[in-house]
Amino acid sequence: MNVTFKDWGSSLASSRYRSLIPAQELKKHGIEQGNDWLVIGKHGWDWKKQTAGFKRVCFDVCDDHFNTPSGDFYREAIQRADLVTSNSQEMARVVKEKTGRESIVIPDPYEQPERKARVHDHLLWFGHQSNLGDLLPWLDRLDNLEVVSGVRVNGVVQWSPEAMDAAFERAGLVVIPTGKSMAKSGNRAIESLRRGLFVVTGYLPAYADLGIYIGDISDGVKWALSHQDEVIYRIKSAQDYIRNEYSPERIGQLWIKALFV
């Protein structure tokens, strides 16, 4: 048996989490690329061309686009696929609500190295430029904030693996305001905790198991800086949990179970 994960380039976090890392893990188990399964996500591609030659197709859903112009594409792809996967319990709930189909939940694995826990007042926000709107209401309320994204505008550090590494090293707290979509995965909080950084975030179901601050962002920053011993303890506890629950090895096993068991 074999499987091909369609990737859309390593600069996309979702491509790394949903394609590149799983493919590496399956290869460790002797599962090479081939035409037994195609795992593919995203939108804007032609079903017939991309799936030609594959025996079965798994459509992987990691963003809630059902109420956008791409919604019809997702509905059709989900109905045509042999198997549907999703990156969070909330995303699976949305898929079921919008299409009637069940999907298998496979979380995003971590990819960052684990670093020593610390906390100080240099704040970091990072993410895709489509999420910058979530941050805008907080800019006047947060001091000493560094922003890393793929958009080329003044005051924003242009994303690259090297720039992201450097930003993590400078940071003492990560802030992640959340937006309208509740179906996202917990990958940004998970990666931050792996890097030894506490996370202050808005509500998102996928963050519920990580022991981070969920609520008002500016209040959370103040709380974290005034409760540093508690913050260090929470980071270490979260790292212990993430090391097992979100390891690439475990996520690889979930993909094998979904596709071949």
Image: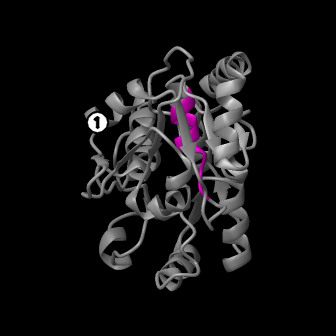
Q: Residue at x 26, y 58 (%)?
A: 153
Q: Quadrant of the C terminus?
A: top right
Horizontal and vertical percent position of residue 78: 56, 73
245 or 253, which lies in front?
Answer: 245
Name the spot of residue 189 as percent of width and height, x first. Answer: 58, 39
**Residue 127 image point, x, y percent:** 43, 50
Point 43% across, 64% down: residue: 130
Quarter holding the N terminus is: top left
User: Does residue 212 sit above or below 157 in this rendering?
Assistant: above
Local secondary structure at mark 1: helix
Q: Is residue 255 visible?
A: no
Q: Quadrant of residue 45?
A: bottom left
Up/down of 80 relative to 16, above or below: below
Magenta residues, start to end: 184-193
Main SS of the magenta part reads: helix
Q: Amino acid at mark 1?
A: Ala
Look at mark 1 in the image and give the residue it sits on. Answer: 163
Magenta segment: does it hold 191?
Answer: yes
- Residue 91 image offset from top left, x and y in percent: 65, 61
Q: Residues within 10 Å of mark 1 (few under 14, many from 20)?
A: some
